Image (tube, rainbow, N blue to C red):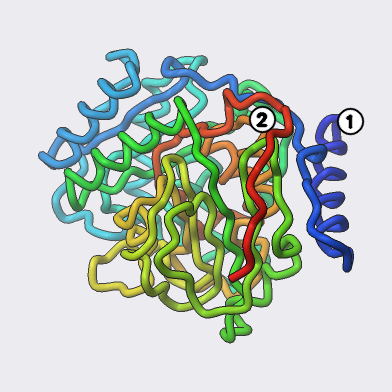
């Protein structure tokens, strides 16, 4: 473990300790380390299904929006019979085809389609980045394989760890996919005062695993214009400043009443959020359809290990440091084999904000 990684872990633990103290609300700005992402457009490979008109259109839009080099666009022949899940054998062929066309600059792989989202019990993003893990499918509720990227200090995942991070941009709706991309791009230019919402719900099985990582209500990170709200409630609604939203429930209600800021992320700890089937009431694409820029969920029954879901403290710590959405989300999941990452990878709402404490209006309790 490098000293830098140790310091990052210590700061995450420091945030937890500060937030747990029975004291007045605190400004946690001094826990933020500014370490902006080093990822650029040349580090991104965009993979699309050349048999799917939606995939082609969205891939072209993304390449243009992010000025990604044309040689980084990779078309695949994914047979029509491949639906939600692809077999490990067929996936191995696709992965080999992708890997053979990547150069040493590529740190991130963006897949542009909705299906397939799973490789047997693995998510397609974890299988693409870490390789297919057959052992997990023998025991879905078993301990996951640790990710070497979990809470890593690395700003060059392929160079440092031999890992190319991957994320999916869903394409069921072309307008929704383009709007998602636009929000990611917009996040790089400005950020408004926002709030992070951490909900303790009555669904103990889904809520309790992550509650230990929630901050004390009403704390702030003033250098990042961020309010922290930890609430005992089943949902929030009619909020106009949502930057982060973490909860635990089978499905999340009232998402359509919320305004998500550019670069916002949200997820709910539940079993099948990563199943992107339109009829699935738990699917995580409901977050991005409502205006979030990224989300995460599992494609097979994981049981409620917190390690198989995003750790809010770690995700927010890296995001506030100026890292991208894909870096921050991937670093927040200890055992990602069953988990699917979706969103616009290069969103970086905090990359250009100076580390100074600015005056903020007093926050009001609900």
Query: Percent x, y for residue 26?
Result: 80, 52
* Residue 144 position within the rendered picture, expressed as x and y whole percent measured from the top left: 64, 61
Is residue 122 positioned above or below 261 on the image? Answer: below
Q: In this view, does 1 lie to the left or right of 314?
A: right
Marks 1 & 2, CB-CB < 8 Å contact = no
Residue that carries the numbered disc 2 in the rendered image: 161
Tell us which disc is closer to us: 1 or 2: 1
Task: Name the element at disc 2.
Answer: helix
SS for dot 1:
helix
- Where, by quadrant of the figure, is residue 66 drawn? top left
Dot 1: few (<14), some (14–19), or many (≥20) neighbours within 10 Å? few
Left or right of residue 296, residue 52 in this image: left
Q: Which residue is drawn at 47% across and 70% down?
A: 236
Rendered view: 44 above or below 319: above
Circle nearer the N terminus (1, 2) = 1
The percent coordinates of residue 211 (x first, y second) are 70, 70
Q: In which quarter of the image is the C terminus?
A: bottom right
Q: Please state the total of marks drawn on the protein image.
A: 2
Q: Is residue 94 above or below residue 46?
A: below
Which label is found at residue 3?
Answer: 1
Q: Residue at x 22, y 54 (%)?
A: 82
Q: Report the Cα–Cα distance between label 1 and label 2.
A: 16 Å
The residue closer to the viewer here, 66 or 79, is: 66
**Residue 148 appears in the figure:** no
């Amino acid at each position: 473990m490098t000293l830098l990684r140790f310091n990052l872990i210590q700061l995450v633990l420091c945030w937890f300790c500060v937030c747990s103290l029975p004291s007045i609300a605190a400004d946690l700005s001094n826990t933020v380390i500014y370490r902006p992402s080093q990822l650029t457009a040349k580090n991104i490979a965009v993979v699309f299904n050349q048999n799917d008109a939606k995939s082609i259109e969205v891939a072209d839009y993304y390449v243009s929006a992010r000025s990604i080099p044309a040689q980084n666009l990779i078309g695949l022949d994914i047979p029509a019979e491949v639906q939600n899940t692809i077999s490990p054998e067929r996936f191995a062929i696709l992965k080999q085809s992708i890997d053979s066309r990547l150069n040493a600059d590529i740190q991130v792989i963006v897949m542009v389609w909705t299906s397939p989202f799973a490789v047997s019990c693995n998510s397609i993003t974890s299988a693409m980045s870490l390789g297919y893990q057959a052992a997990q499918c023998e025991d879905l509720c078993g301990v996951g394989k640790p990710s070497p990227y979990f809470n890593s200090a690395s700003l060059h995942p392929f160079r440092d760890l031999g890992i190319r991070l991957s994320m999916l941009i869903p394409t069921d709706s072309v307008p929704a996919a383009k709007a998602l991309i636009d929000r990611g791009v917009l996040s790089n230019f400005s950020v408004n005062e926002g709030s992070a919402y951490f909900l303790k719900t009555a669904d103990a099985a889904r809520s309790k695993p992550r509650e230990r990582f929630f901050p004390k209500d009403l704390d702030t990170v003033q250098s990042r214009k961020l309010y922290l709200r930890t609430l005992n409630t089943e949902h929030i609604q009619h909020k106009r400043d949502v930057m982060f939203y973490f909860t635990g429930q089978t499905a999340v209600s009232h998402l359509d009443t919320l305004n998500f800021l550019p670069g916002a992320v949200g997820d709910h700890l539940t079993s099948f959020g990563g199943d992107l089937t339109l009829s699935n009431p738990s699917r995580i694409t409901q977050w991005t359809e409502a205006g979030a820029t990224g989300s995460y969920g599992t494609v097979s029954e994981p049981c409620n290990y917190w390690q198989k879901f995003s750790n809010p403290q770690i995700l927010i710590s890296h995001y506030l440091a100026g890292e991208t959405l894909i870096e921050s989300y991937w670093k927040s999941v200890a055992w990602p084999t069953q988990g699917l990452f979706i969103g616009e990878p290069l969103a970086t709402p905090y990359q250009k904000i100076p580390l100074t404490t600015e005056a903020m209006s007093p926050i009001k309790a609900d």
